[in-house]
Amino acid sequence: MVVIIDPGHGGKDPGAIGYGIREKDVVLGIGLKLGRLMNENYPEVHVVFTRSTDVFVPLIDRSKIANKNKADLFISIHANSGGTPATTGTETFVLGLHRSKENLEVAKKENSVILLEEDYSKTYEGFDPNSSESYIMFELVQDIYMDQSLSFADAIQHQFKSRLSTSNRGVKQAGLLVLRQSSMPSVLVEAGFLSNHGEANYLSTEEGQRTIALSIFEAFKKFKAKNEGNPTAIADKNQRSANNSRNTEPERVQQPRDTVKPEKAETTEQKSVEPDKTEPLQETPQTTKPETTDTEVQGTTYYSVQIGANTTPIEPVPGNFKGLKNVRREKTDKYYRYYIGKETSVEEIKETWKQIKLKFPQSFIVSFVDGKRIILDSSK
Ligand SMILES: [Zn+2]
């Protein structure tokens, strides 16, 4: 598993500043602490930082680092400012079209860092971070990772709620460029308001940063448990990064080891009360009602490879599935599932699966018995 930790801003870009406290410093502190928690507790997880020092990293390069490392999760860390000096709270964003002017303002603020980049107009194809019209493109976003991003964002806010005294501003959607160009479940955390004196002070302390990091880490534990060996809906990684014309090598940053005593993750498992937006780990057989006109379902058993699932349908065309032809989409309950192959023997589908796995490592075999979908334990 590869996790990208993306502390926002850096170098010539301080981000928000409040009471002398700079966003770039706060989020780097949180990011490094989060990375250390992951390394200490999950040595098998490969943590990659988009920056681990005070350097300027163009927005597009952050996504490139994530895409080139074939990351499973992208965590962008920021701190807020705005509203009135009394405005406080945490919020976590997933990609989408803003539902309120407030969310648009956050997107404008975070996206406007591209103005510090040379050739930003060319790199981002004329995207103007300050023009509301530019954001219309986010209406067309078909994010196959939305379920997982939302679920992770929910878990983060749930942790914040139980660990921080500040208000929970919830999970939101906005047109954030850094999320748009990353082809994996992605969230952007706004860890609090630097424009509020108390919150700025808190975020500048070791304790404050540690609590934020621990909250994200606890949410990550849930994400990891939920998604391991589980269907991950995958879209064409090239599709969304197609605009990236520059060729920067990904920055692989080793997690700095220092002498600070590592934070121990709390072992008490908290029961999440939020509704589960991702596909459940264990599924009971369900009756499948194929969307397609394909009717050879009744009275037969066949096997398919499931590539992914989501709630917002995308077209099962090769362009959306790394060039794979004959992907079929079926809808069961609220999920659109994407399958390939329809074989009558396990041996045959395993052959198919071998090929599919090269492109979609988290695909798995399902069988359909009289229209009922059953997940096979593919390890056997
Ligand atoms: Zn920021």
Image: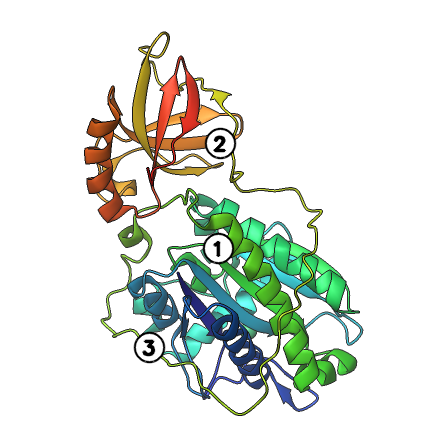
Q: Residue furthest top?
A: 299
Which residue is labeled 3 in the image?
Answer: 252
Of the residues under marks 1 and 3, which one precedes in the sequence?
A: 1
> Tag 3's secondary structure?
loop
Identify the amino acid type marked 1: Tyr
Would you call the spot at circle 1 few (<14 residues within 10 Å), some (14-19), or many (20 or more)?
A: many
Which residue is labeled 2 in the image?
Answer: 335
The answer to whether residue 131 is above or below residue 371 is below
Q: Position of residue 133 (x, y in %)?
A: 48, 55
Residue 133 shows up from this direction: yes
Horizontal side of 160 relative to 302 (left or right) equals right
Horizontal side of 165 relative to 41 (left or right) equals right
Residue depicted at 50% across the width and 71% down the height: 38
> Tag 2's secondary structure?
strand
Residue depicted at 62% across the width and 60% down the height: 156
Q: Quadrant of the C terminus?
A: top left
Q: Position of residue 229 (x, y in %)?
A: 41, 47
Q: Quadrant of the N terminus?
A: bottom left
Which residue is labeled 1 in the image?
Answer: 135
- The reply to whether callout 1 and callout 3 are in contact (CB within 8 Å) is no
Q: Which mark is residue 276?
A: none
